[in-house]
Amino acid sequence: MFLNIDQIKTIQMDHTSRCQLACPQCARFHGSQTELNPYMPIDDTTVDDYKIILEPFERDSVKLFHCGNFGDSLASPTFDASLDYCIDQGVKEFKMAVNGSARSKEWWRDLAQKSNRIVVNFSIDGLEDTNHLYRVNSNFKKIMENAKAFIDAGGNARWYFIEFEHNYHQIDEAKRIASDMGFKQFNAKYTGRFAEQQQNKVETKKGTLVEDKKDNHNQKDMQEIKQTYDSFEQYIEQTPITCKYKQENSMFIDMQMKLWPCTWMGAPAYFGPNNPQRKSFDAIYNLYGEDFNDMRKYGWDILQHEFFAKYLDRSWNDQDDKFKRIYTCGRTCGDKFEFSSGYGKNTKRENL
């Protein structure tokens, strides 16, 4: 059994697949990483969806985190009403990861005053001369104005900074600014995407190149994996798997109300058919169909489905030929490669 309803403490979500930015390594893009992913539906969750999500939970018992797998919640026309509903229902915490470019200063001030249970993770990868290089279409001045309005009104804000070759020299300055403004936390983090894609640079929609930080340990880890296992694919087939989300009593719901064990499994369902992660889903869909985890149809009864009750645990341990190992599980929760920027040695978290 993956988790039962009483064990769930955090629900991560993609409220929407809409976003104002064009970050080149985002799952919203496809192929050249400048073309919008054609397999990704444009969709939003609604208040009616949150009624389904929160129905079995008592007040102050569960946290919600809009983690932004595909979209930024503030780009959604259904976000405000959904937020108000969740706050009225007494969620323990409502956290969201945003780029900070959307909405007015007045909106951000009002957000801070809605509830002390709201936490905002601002994804700001540099300063005025660098943030836009990866966060394409972002507006640094507006981000700072919005963050200041939120913090000055009592809001709990955290700064998340992905290190690239073009911005890592600004970390100390960014941290100083964060402290002066009243951010509660500063997080500098590496990405594993360059190493996984076996490249050091990526082209943005603006035609510029973003380069991985030269001493990113993920590149070294990937080389060691290839020397030991011959290929990353062989590593995924053989590595021991320890599920991060199960350890954290967390699950993920995507913008179409599909329930997944984690945010990393919530993305490949909308990748192209040749993507190695998406290919793993064929075995799942062949067994159960593509709507087996639709919460709009089945609610939390899905937790009793064979996929959650048996498939996941047995696939990690290679116990049954019926339950094929899932590529994403080995990629993100194997023991030699830390794909996620939010875990382990990929992140340096500092309270301010």
Image: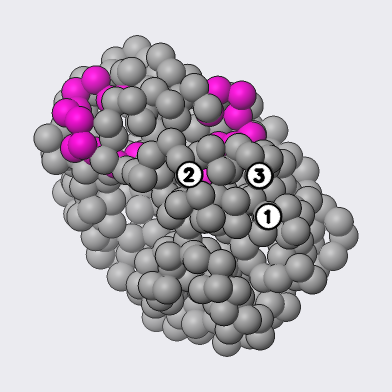
State how the image is colored. one colour
Residue 154 image position (x, y, % from top left):
45, 52
Q: CA distance from mark 3 to mark 2?
A: 11 Å
Give whichever of discs 3 and 2 has the lower sequence position.
3
Q: What residue is at 12 percent from the left and 35 percent from the top?
A: 6
| Residue segment shown in magenta | 53-79
Give whichever of discs 1 and 3 has the lower sequence position.
3
- Of the residues shown, which amino acid type is indicated by label 2? Ala
Is residue 112 found left or right of 163 in the rendered image? left
- Of the residues shown, which amino acid type is indicated by label 3? Lys
Q: Are marks 1 and 3 in contact (CB under 8 Å)?
A: yes
Q: Nearer the viewer, residue 121 or 322?
A: 121
Q: Which residue is mark 1?
A: 145
Is residue 6 found left or right of 33 in the rendered image? left
Magenta run includes residue 200: no
Q: Say above or below: 87 vs 236.
A: above
Q: What residue is at 62 percent from the left and 62 percent from the top?
A: 124
In the rendering, which numbered label is found on residue 112?
Answer: 2
